[in-house]
Amino acid sequence: MDITKKIYAKAKSNPKTIVLPEYKDNRVIEAARFIQKEGIAKVILLSEDKILPQEKEKYIQEFYEMRKSKGLDLDTARKTLEDPLYYAAMMTRFGEADGFVAGASHTTSDVARAAIHCLGMNERINIACSCFIMDVPNCAYGENGTFIFADCGIVPEPNPRQLACISLAAAELATKVLDFIPRIALLSYSTHGSAKGKYVEEIIEALKLLREMAPGIIADGEIQVDAAIVPEVAQIKYPDSVLAGKANILIFPNLEAGNISYKLVQRLAGARATGPLILGLNKPCSDLSRGCSAEDVVNCVAATAIRAQ
């Protein structure tokens, strides 16, 4: 079955409520109609008539209490909750929605900031990060052409512990949403000592920390991408790798590498990119590319709904 159909079917099996704050965007409106028609999720298009004064006041007070230690005053809290992104995020915090999806007309930093401030960090992961589900047509690599790329949207220069946490969060998403056994490659310009440098040492440290956090996880690094995903190359460059050229989760050493890579694969290989799905928070949410299609919105809603199940 096509991976998108599998995601839709899994979302339909236990429909969750997802709020969409960008109710004026035609792509979001079209996506909401399709989602409701297909029963993928229960969607709330957060138009002005759905923003209730009593609820809003509750959210303002809660947001103020959460952020006053950071210097936030009540007037600023009121102004902040004028933004539908924050209203949607607070709905999710209070359980009045199971997740939210935005970004068609907001930047990633806008969406991530609202999510982090309102939903809070998962203490075990302890970092907000993101990933894309990449579905590459006519591709034998990964999981029949499906990969998770992380982080491609939030953390500019992850340190070793952050790389380990990003890897763990991506692995948990692979298991929950895609039913994959995670096989994680921490990518580098070096494969097990073929080159030296500060960045190589950081990836070696990240792998060590990841294995301490999740003993038994299938992961390797530092490793070049061809050795990570092509079995024939893996046999030449590092035949003892536990990945054996079959990685389905690619962890990039920094945001530049991740962002450039996902866009190259999307545009040159015609891959379907779902995300960025925001990871490491207490409740699920997803960002969207501002260049997204209505189908991209549907895919992000479906993946977010599964994470809320």
Image: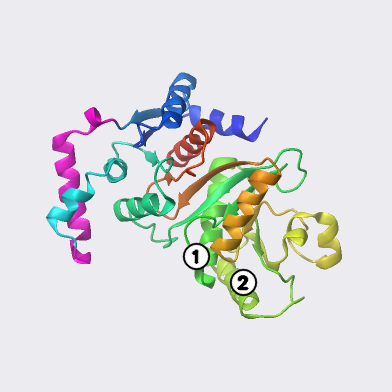
Q: Residue furthest bottom?
A: 197
Q: Nearer the viewer, mark 1 or mark 2?
A: 1
Give residue 53's quadrant in the image.
top left
Q: Where is residue 112 drawn, in percent x and y?
A: 39, 53
260 magenta-colored: no
What amino acid is labelled 2 in the image? Ile
Residue at 19%, 49% (x, y): give it: 79
Name the side, left or right, on which 26 lies relative to 58.
right
Residue at 51%, 68% (x, y): give it: 158
Magenta stretch in the rendered image: 47-71
Q: Residues within 10 Å of mark 2 (few under 14, many from 20)?
A: many
> How many angstroms separate mark 1 from mark 2 (CA)?
15 Å
Q: Residues within 10 Å of mark 1 (few under 14, many from 20)?
A: some
> Which residue is disc 1 drawn over?
156
Quadrant of the rendering where the C terminus is positioned: top left
Residue at 75%, 55% (x, y): give it: 229
Image disc number at residue 241:
none
Give residue 193's quadrant in the image.
bottom right
Q: Residue furthest top?
A: 37
Name the side, left or right, on which 129 lies relative to 49.
right
> Which residue is disc 2 drawn over?
203
Q: Main secondary structure of the magenta part?
A: helix
Residue at 69%, 42% (x, y): give it: 136
Between 261 and 8, the one nearer to me in the picture = 261
Q: Can residue 182 be seen from the camera position used here?
A: no
